[in-house]
Image (tube, rainbow, N blue to C red):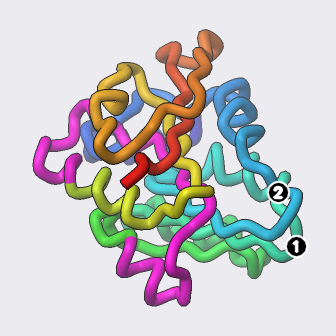
Amino acid sequence: MSLLFFKRVLANPLRVGYVVPSSPFLTRQTAKRIDFSRPRVVVELGPGEGCHTRQIVKRMNKDSRLILIELDEEFAAHLRKSFAHDARVTVLHTDAQHLPQTLAELGHTHCDYIISGLPFLVIEEEIRNKILRNIAESMNSESRFITYQVTDQLCDHDHLFELAGREYCPLNLPPINVFEFRKAAA
Protein backbone atom coordinates (compact mmCIF):
# COMPACT_ATOMS: atom_id res chain seq x y z
CA MET A 1 0.00 0.00 0.00
CA SER A 2 1.37 3.39 -0.96
CA LEU A 3 1.63 6.29 1.44
CA LEU A 4 -0.76 8.27 -0.80
CA PHE A 5 -3.44 5.57 -0.56
CA PHE A 6 -3.03 5.35 3.22
CA LYS A 7 -3.30 9.15 3.59
CA ARG A 8 -6.42 9.33 1.40
CA VAL A 9 -8.11 6.49 3.34
CA LEU A 10 -7.43 8.33 6.59
CA ALA A 11 -8.68 11.62 5.14
CA ASN A 12 -11.93 10.22 3.74
CA PRO A 13 -12.48 6.47 4.27
CA LEU A 14 -16.02 6.38 2.84
CA ARG A 15 -15.00 8.13 -0.36
CA VAL A 16 -12.07 5.76 -0.93
CA GLY A 17 -14.27 2.83 0.09
CA TYR A 18 -11.49 0.28 0.61
CA VAL A 19 -8.91 -0.20 3.34
CA VAL A 20 -6.20 -1.53 0.99
CA PRO A 21 -5.67 -1.18 -2.77
CA SER A 22 -6.93 -3.91 -5.12
CA SER A 23 -4.74 -6.99 -5.35
CA PRO A 24 -2.87 -7.87 -8.57
CA PHE A 25 -5.21 -10.88 -8.84
CA LEU A 26 -8.26 -8.59 -8.91
CA THR A 27 -6.74 -6.04 -11.29
CA ARG A 28 -5.82 -8.80 -13.79
CA GLN A 29 -9.24 -10.43 -13.42
CA THR A 30 -10.95 -7.11 -14.16
CA ALA A 31 -8.70 -6.00 -17.04
CA LYS A 32 -8.90 -9.33 -18.89
CA ARG A 33 -12.61 -8.67 -19.48
CA ILE A 34 -11.76 -5.80 -21.86
CA ASP A 35 -11.38 -6.76 -25.51
CA PHE A 36 -8.72 -4.60 -27.12
CA SER A 37 -8.79 -6.37 -30.49
CA ARG A 38 -9.93 -3.00 -31.88
CA PRO A 39 -9.77 0.59 -30.58
CA ARG A 40 -11.91 1.16 -27.49
CA VAL A 41 -13.07 4.02 -25.33
CA VAL A 42 -12.75 2.92 -21.70
CA VAL A 43 -13.82 4.93 -18.66
CA GLU A 44 -12.57 4.14 -15.19
CA LEU A 45 -14.62 5.61 -12.36
CA GLY A 46 -12.69 6.20 -9.15
CA PRO A 47 -9.29 4.87 -10.19
CA GLY A 48 -7.69 5.95 -6.90
CA GLU A 49 -3.96 5.50 -7.16
CA GLY A 50 -4.25 3.56 -10.44
CA CYS A 51 -3.97 -0.19 -9.64
CA HIS A 52 -6.55 -1.15 -12.28
CA THR A 53 -5.43 1.67 -14.56
CA ARG A 54 -1.93 0.20 -14.92
CA GLN A 55 -3.37 -3.20 -15.91
CA ILE A 56 -5.67 -1.59 -18.48
CA VAL A 57 -2.90 0.57 -19.97
CA LYS A 58 -0.69 -2.52 -20.38
CA ARG A 59 -3.37 -4.18 -22.51
CA MET A 60 -4.58 -1.16 -24.54
CA ASN A 61 -3.77 -0.83 -28.20
CA LYS A 62 -2.35 2.42 -29.55
CA ASP A 63 -5.70 3.77 -30.76
CA SER A 64 -7.72 3.14 -27.61
CA ARG A 65 -8.58 5.86 -25.10
CA LEU A 66 -8.78 5.61 -21.31
CA ILE A 67 -10.69 8.30 -19.43
CA LEU A 68 -10.05 8.39 -15.70
CA ILE A 69 -12.72 10.11 -13.60
CA GLU A 70 -11.48 10.73 -10.07
CA LEU A 71 -13.29 12.78 -7.41
CA ASP A 72 -10.33 13.01 -5.02
CA GLU A 73 -8.06 15.87 -6.08
CA GLU A 74 -4.86 14.29 -4.69
CA PHE A 75 -5.51 10.99 -6.47
CA ALA A 76 -6.25 12.92 -9.69
CA ALA A 77 -2.97 14.84 -9.40
CA HIS A 78 -1.08 11.58 -8.79
CA LEU A 79 -2.71 9.98 -11.86
CA ARG A 80 -1.91 12.99 -14.06
CA LYS A 81 1.73 12.71 -13.04
CA SER A 82 1.82 8.91 -13.43
CA PHE A 83 0.29 8.89 -16.93
CA ALA A 84 1.56 12.24 -18.26
CA HIS A 85 3.66 10.39 -20.84
CA ASP A 86 0.70 8.45 -22.30
CA ALA A 87 -1.50 10.42 -24.73
CA ARG A 88 -4.11 7.63 -24.62
CA VAL A 89 -4.97 8.48 -21.00
CA THR A 90 -7.08 11.47 -19.93
CA VAL A 91 -7.35 12.23 -16.21
CA LEU A 92 -10.28 14.32 -15.03
CA HIS A 93 -10.93 15.60 -11.53
CA THR A 94 -14.72 15.37 -11.64
CA ASP A 95 -17.69 13.44 -10.33
CA ALA A 96 -19.04 10.20 -11.83
CA GLN A 97 -22.49 11.80 -11.60
CA HIS A 98 -21.53 13.83 -14.69
CA LEU A 99 -20.45 10.91 -16.89
CA PRO A 100 -22.65 11.58 -19.97
CA GLN A 101 -21.70 15.28 -20.01
CA THR A 102 -18.02 14.43 -19.52
CA LEU A 103 -18.08 12.00 -22.44
CA ALA A 104 -19.87 14.56 -24.64
CA GLU A 105 -17.25 17.21 -23.81
CA LEU A 106 -14.59 14.75 -24.97
CA GLY A 107 -16.49 14.05 -28.20
CA HIS A 108 -17.95 10.63 -27.32
CA THR A 109 -21.62 9.63 -27.41
CA HIS A 110 -20.93 6.47 -25.39
CA CYS A 111 -18.04 4.35 -24.18
CA ASP A 112 -17.21 0.71 -24.80
CA TYR A 113 -16.30 -0.18 -21.22
CA ILE A 114 -16.88 1.38 -17.82
CA ILE A 115 -14.68 -0.01 -15.06
CA SER A 116 -15.56 0.89 -11.49
CA GLY A 117 -14.85 -0.05 -7.94
CA LEU A 118 -16.90 2.81 -6.55
CA PRO A 119 -18.19 1.61 -3.16
CA PHE A 120 -21.87 1.65 -4.16
CA LEU A 121 -22.82 -0.01 -0.85
CA VAL A 122 -21.86 3.11 1.12
CA ILE A 123 -22.84 5.79 -1.40
CA GLU A 124 -26.03 7.67 -0.48
CA GLU A 125 -28.98 6.10 -2.34
CA GLU A 126 -29.95 9.17 -4.39
CA ILE A 127 -26.37 9.72 -5.57
CA ARG A 128 -25.85 5.98 -6.20
CA ASN A 129 -28.99 5.84 -8.35
CA LYS A 130 -27.94 8.91 -10.33
CA ILE A 131 -24.48 7.46 -11.00
CA LEU A 132 -25.97 4.13 -12.09
CA ARG A 133 -28.50 5.85 -14.41
CA ASN A 134 -25.68 7.90 -15.93
CA ILE A 135 -23.56 4.79 -16.42
CA ALA A 136 -26.44 3.15 -18.29
CA GLU A 137 -26.99 6.34 -20.32
CA SER A 138 -23.32 6.27 -21.34
CA MET A 139 -23.59 2.75 -22.74
CA ASN A 140 -24.91 1.30 -25.98
CA SER A 141 -25.93 -2.31 -26.64
CA GLU A 142 -22.28 -3.39 -27.09
CA SER A 143 -20.91 -1.60 -24.02
CA ARG A 144 -19.98 -3.36 -20.79
CA PHE A 145 -20.00 -2.11 -17.21
CA ILE A 146 -17.40 -4.03 -15.19
CA THR A 147 -17.44 -3.46 -11.46
CA TYR A 148 -15.95 -5.13 -8.41
CA GLN A 149 -18.16 -5.12 -5.34
CA VAL A 150 -18.42 -6.95 -2.00
CA THR A 151 -22.20 -7.43 -2.40
CA ASP A 152 -24.48 -8.31 -5.30
CA GLN A 153 -26.61 -5.20 -4.67
CA LEU A 154 -26.19 -3.96 -8.27
CA CYS A 155 -27.98 -7.06 -9.60
CA ASP A 156 -31.16 -5.45 -8.21
CA HIS A 157 -30.88 -2.70 -10.86
CA ASP A 158 -32.20 -4.93 -13.64
CA HIS A 159 -34.14 -2.00 -15.12
CA LEU A 160 -30.71 -0.55 -16.02
CA PHE A 161 -28.41 -3.56 -16.43
CA GLU A 162 -28.43 -7.23 -17.38
CA LEU A 163 -25.85 -9.48 -15.78
CA ALA A 164 -23.47 -10.76 -18.47
CA GLY A 165 -20.96 -12.46 -16.17
CA ARG A 166 -19.82 -12.81 -12.60
CA GLU A 167 -16.58 -14.07 -11.10
CA TYR A 168 -15.40 -14.30 -7.51
CA CYS A 169 -11.91 -13.12 -6.54
CA PRO A 170 -10.94 -14.70 -3.21
CA LEU A 171 -7.37 -13.37 -3.51
CA ASN A 172 -8.23 -9.80 -2.60
CA LEU A 173 -8.78 -8.02 0.71
CA PRO A 174 -11.70 -8.20 1.12
CA PRO A 175 -12.59 -11.10 -1.19
CA ILE A 176 -14.75 -9.54 -3.88
CA ASN A 177 -17.09 -10.18 -6.81
CA VAL A 178 -16.35 -8.98 -10.34
CA PHE A 179 -19.57 -8.28 -12.23
CA GLU A 180 -19.95 -7.66 -15.94
CA PHE A 181 -23.17 -5.93 -16.97
CA ARG A 182 -24.62 -4.93 -20.30
CA LYS A 183 -27.25 -2.23 -20.73
CA ALA A 184 -30.76 -3.54 -20.17
CA ALA A 185 -32.91 -3.81 -23.27
CA ALA A 186 -35.25 -0.85 -23.63
- At a point 57% along the width and 33% down the height, the residue shown is 164
Vertical comparison of 84 with 57: above or below:
below
- At a point 64% along the width and 13% down the height, the residue shown is 171
Does 127 appear in magenta?
A: yes
Quarter of the figure that contains the N terminus: top right
**168 relative to 6 in the view: left or right:** right
Vertical comparison of 3 with 99: above or below:
above
Vertical comparison of 70 with 115: above or below:
below
Q: Is residue 39 visible?
A: yes
For mark 2, give the secondary structure: loop
Amino acid type of the residue that numbered disc 2 sits on in the rendered structure: Phe
Q: Is residue 3 visible?
A: no
Q: Position of residue 169 (x, y in %)?
A: 61, 17
Magenta residues (range) = 100-129
For residue 3, the mark is none
Q: Residue furthest top?
A: 170
Does 29 appear in magenta?
A: no
Q: Position of residue 27 (x, y in %)?
A: 67, 35
Give the foreground label among 2 and 1: 2
**176 relative to 126 in the view: left or right:** right
Q: Residue furthest front?
A: 186
Q: Position of residue 122 (x, y in %)?
A: 22, 34
**Could you say which is closer to the camera, residue 158 or residue 43?**
158
- At a point 46% along the width and 50% down the height, the residue shown is 183
Q: Which residue is mark 2?
A: 36
Q: Which residue is mark 1?
A: 62
- At a point 41% along the width and 72% down the height, the residue shown is 93
Amino acid type of the residue that numbered disc 1 sits on in the rendered structure: Lys
State yes or no: discs 2 and 1 in contact (Cβ < 8 Å): no
